[in-house]
Image (cartoon, helix red, strand yellow):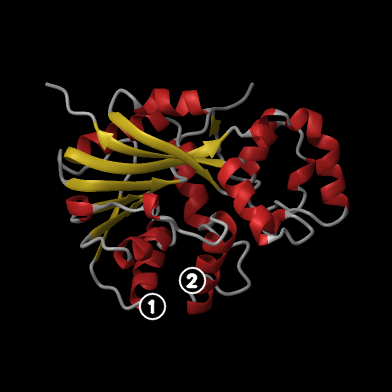
Amino acid sequence: MEISKTIDDVRNFWETNPLFAGESSYPVGSNEYFEEHRQVVITDCFAGNLESRLFPSGENNTAVLDLGCGPGFWVIELLKNGARRVTAVDITERALQLTSQRAAVYGLNSVETSRQNAECLTFPDGLFSHVNCLGVIHHTPSPASCIKEMARVLKPDGTAVIAVYYKNVYLKFWPLLRFIGKILNFIGGGLRGQGRESLFLVSDINELIRIYDGADNPIGKAFSKREFTDMLSPYFKIEGCFYHFFPARSLPFRVPKWLHRFLDAHTGFMIYARCKKEVTA
């Protein structure tokens, strides 16, 4: 019988396996590590473009919560794109250390850090104007609890951008596409580090999603658009959904930029929702 993973399992894994640590060519926490990570996120995860829908606008950039900050990529990009103050939150001390280091490297000092469990935040109601939570809650035992907490700590009319792994066309039809995975693996496809070198040989899509972030990663989930919006709708008005993240770096050949942009926008492995807090009477 499968043993359910707990939030402590999640914390322990990410404490010892910070994001991009197994893949980077450089020591974790070095200037080169941060810059290499930035280039990979922008060029591979977003096909070269961090579009404006990813960032808060107007007055909602005054007090931003980056929930699940990891090594601090979004903290820096939020500040560079107009956020006045960012509070970086993560379940691990290592992520908060890396975020502080990254802020120092980029000469930014308006960053506060706090170790928190996204399922049960300690912040008071209505503290933040915007929540940024990208690629985080699909690693928790209860994503719905995280969404409820995001809404609670937002002020009335506060906004959020939330993203999770998406059950795209490739995942839906993976059992029929496994022969392609075997070919990709044979000619050198896969990801470096964290036991992901044979990623394309994984047959079960749930295992494929989990192992993407490391063979020992305790939790990794993907959602359909309906499943995702059903979790959001009790607390948020969804202003729009869009897609990103086609990891071309996992392929054993170069993908042309125009094709990468098309695949990123139309067959991405992450679904993003731009939301506004639903205020009830």
The part of the image, by quadrant, that contains residue 276 is top left
Measured Cα–Cα span from mark 1 to mark 2: 9 Å
For the point 79% across and 58% down, which residue is it? 252
Please give left or right for residue 70 compared with residue 187 in the image.
left
Counting from the top left corner in percent of width and height, residue 271 is at: 50, 39
Mark 1 lies on a secondary structure that is helix
Residue 34 — which label?
2
Mark 1 lies on residue: 105
Question: Is 207 above or below relative to 247?
Answer: above
Q: Amino acid at mark 2?
A: Phe
For the point 69% across and 36% down, which residue is it? 170
Counting from the top left corner in percent of width and height, residue 225 is at: 50, 28
Q: Is residue 194 visible?
A: no
Q: In the displayed orientation, state which residue is furthest to the left.
A: 281
Please give left or right for residue 42 compared with residue 74 in the image.
right
For the point 65% across and 43% down, which residue is it? 211
Counting from the top left corner in percent of width and height, residue 57 is at: 26, 52
Contact between labelled residues 2 and 1, with CB atoms less than 8 Å apart: yes
